[in-house]
Image (tube, helix red, strand yellow):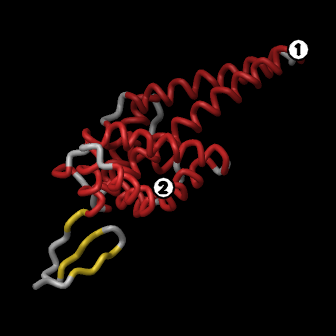
Amino acid sequence: MLVEMVIDGMDVPEDGTAQDAVAELLVRIADGDQDAFASLYDSLSPRVFGLILRVLVNRSQSEEVLQEVFLEIWQSAGRFAPNRGQGRSWVMTIAHRRAVDRVRASQSSADRDVRAGLRDLGVAHDSVAEQVELGLEGERVVGALAGLPEAQREALVLAYYGGYSQNEIAVLVGAPLGTIKTRMRDGLSRLRTAMGVRA
């Protein structure tokens, strides 16, 4: 008879085999199991909230995004494929993407407010031209990022928008550290080429 220990969301029997407890909950949630959803929320919500808060900084926005994340998990648990990755990584990826989306939406709103404010203040032409140039450069970067393969784009967004270290990204996406380093190096190389920057 195997004695099992629960280690950080993973059931690890004495023989060393590991079973993804979060993945099991997600499969049950896909079948509409509300108890499984409650268990998932209780076990992961503090960690998910910490990730979101780290990206957003604003506590009230982080609380809103936390609710959005778990609503999405409830609605889309059927899309989780246990054979393609860890359940915890899938949940954390949803959380990070939602947080980054909120940052982008907030930034867009702030940019609109700045443009409206500058227009109302009658700022000198040079300042407006500089603001437009910065906006165009930002659009070029977003366009160049969109042209990257998903794995490279995800690693770069987590690093530069989310502020994660390469080790943290490796844990988040469930990939070896060496793979993350390669994705980031290749992604940055492609971005430099797309932006016309010489190394």
- Checking the image for residue 122, the label placed there is 1
> Residue at position x 63%, y 43% from top?
61
Direction from residue 76 to residue 130 in the image, left or right? right
Q: Number of numbered discs present?
A: 2
Residue nearer the viewer, 31 or 191: 31
**SS for dot 1:** loop
Q: Nearer the viewer, mark 2 or mark 1?
A: 2
Q: Taking 94 as reference, is 88 above or below it?
A: below
Can you tell which quarter of the image residue 3 is in? bottom left
Q: Taking 135 as reference, is 168 above or below it?
A: below
> Residue at position x 24%, y 63% from top?
20
Name the quadrant of the N terminus: bottom left
Query: How far is the residue under mark 2 from the one under mark 1?
Result: 44 Å
**SS for dot 2:** helix
The answer to whether residue 184 of the structure is visible from this angle is yes
> Residue at position x 19%, y 70% from top?
18
> Residue at position x 72%, y 23% from top?
131
The answer to whether residue 161 of the structure is visible from this angle is no
Q: Position of residue 90 (x, y in %)?
A: 33, 49
Q: Taking 77 as reference, is 143 above or below it?
A: above
Furthest-left residue in view?
1
Q: Position of residue 180 (x, y in %)?
A: 33, 54
Amino acid type of disc 2? Val
Q: Position of residue 189 (x, y in %)?
A: 38, 41
Residue nearer the viewer, 62 or 134: 62
- Checking the image for residue 48, the label placed there is 2
Name the quadrant of the C terminus: top left
